[in-house]
Amino acid sequence: MIRIHRARERLWSIDRPASQVPCRGSPFHNPGAGAPGCGGIPPAPPAPPTLAGPAHIRAARALGKGRDVPGKWYQGVSPQDGTALKDIDTTVAHPARVYDYWLGGKDNFAVDREAAEEVLRARPAIRLNVRSNRAFLARSVSYLTAEAGVRQFLDIGTGIPSANNTHEVAQSVIPAARVAYVDNDPIVLSHARALLTSTSGPTSYIDADLRDTAAVLAEAARILDFTRPVAIMLIAVLHLTPDEDDPWEIVARLMEAVPSGSYLVISHPASDVEAGSAAQAARRYNELVASPMRRRSLDQVRRFFDGLDILDPGVVQLHQWRPADGEPVAPSSGYGAVGRKP
C-alpha cells in the first residue's frame, strides 16, 4: 500500500519560532507573507552559496557526523561524516549530475559532462527539453496551490536544487505549505541543506528509493497529513524505473495512500515524439550513464493516471500544459499531465 527506498530521513522541519524564520532569498519570497526577518527582526545568517564540483564534499561534512542536531527547527539525523562523499562515484556518469549539466549547473564531474555532450550530439534539443520540464513543474505547482488549494506536496526524485524548486513555488503562494522531498542520490543529499534554507513552511528531505513506497510514505507521514489532500510530484523520474519494476504499480500504491482530492503530477520523456533522435539519444544515454532510462509512449504515460480525473489539457507535451499568456515556452519531447483522485 505504501513504500519507497532510503531509510534515513534528513528532516529540516521549519517549526521554528517566528523570530527565527529567515528572510528568504527566493525570487518568489513575499515579505508580507509572514516571513519575520524582513520587517525589523534581524534575519538569520544567509544560506551558504551553492557549491560546485568537488566542493560538495565540504557541504556534506558541514552537515555533521550522524547525530541528532539540537534545535526545534532541525529535527532528525544528519548525514554520517563522509557518507555522501564515499557514495559518490565520479568514474561513471549519474542521471542527476547529467541533468544538472544540461540545465547549465555546475554540480557535475568530467564524466557527467562527457556523457551529456555525447547525448546532446544525438539530440541537441535536450537542453530545451529539460528547461521545459522545470517550467512545467513551476506551472503545475502554481496551479495546485493558487487554484486547487493544495497545501501538501510529496516530491519524489528531487534532483540537484535548481530554480523554481517545489517548496519555493508552493510557499510563495501558501507560506505554510508542507513539502517532503525524496531522493536517494548522495550528491542530492549533500545539497539538502541548501535546498531547504529558503522555506517558510514545514519542509523535509527523505533519503529513500521510489520503488520502496512503504518507506517513503512512512517517513513522509512525519511531516505530511495523509488524511488531507497531497500532491504527489513525479517529475522526470519514472523513466529511470524499468518496466520490470512495474512503475505503474508503484504509482498506484502511492495514490492509494492519499485521500480523495489528492493530485498526481508526472513528466516523462516520450518515445513517440521525434522518435528517431529520441531513440538514438536514449541508446547513447544508456551506454554512458549509471541508471538506464526508458522513454515511454503517450499510451504508456496515460496508464499512470488510471482511475484519476486528468485535468485539461490532458496528457500533452510539456510546453503545451497551460502555458501563461505571453510566456516563452521551450518545446519539449516529453509528456506531462496532472490528475486528480476522485
Image (cartoon, helix red, strand yellow):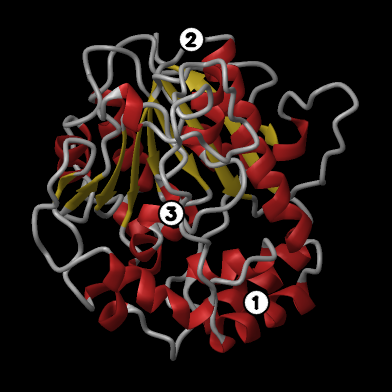
**Local secondary structure at mark 1:** helix
**Which numbered dot is residue 194?**
3
Q: Residue at x 60, y 41 (%)?
A: 164
Number of callouts in the render?
A: 3
For the residue carrying disc 2, how many other residues have a C-alpha within 10 Å: few (<14), some (14-19), or many (20+)? some
**Pair 2/3: label in front:** 3
Q: Earlier in the sequence, mark 2 or mark 3?
A: 2
**Pair 1/3: label in front:** 3
**Local secondary structure at mark 2:** loop
Q: Earlier in the sequence, mark 1 or mark 3?
A: 1
Q: Residue at x 44, y 27 (%)?
A: 41
Residue bearing the label numbered 2: 149
Viewer-proximal residue among 244 and 14: 14
**Pair 1/2: label in front:** 2
Residue 21 falls in which quadrant of the image?
top left
For the residue carrying disc 3, how many other residues have a C-alpha within 10 Å: few (<14), some (14-19), or many (20+)? some
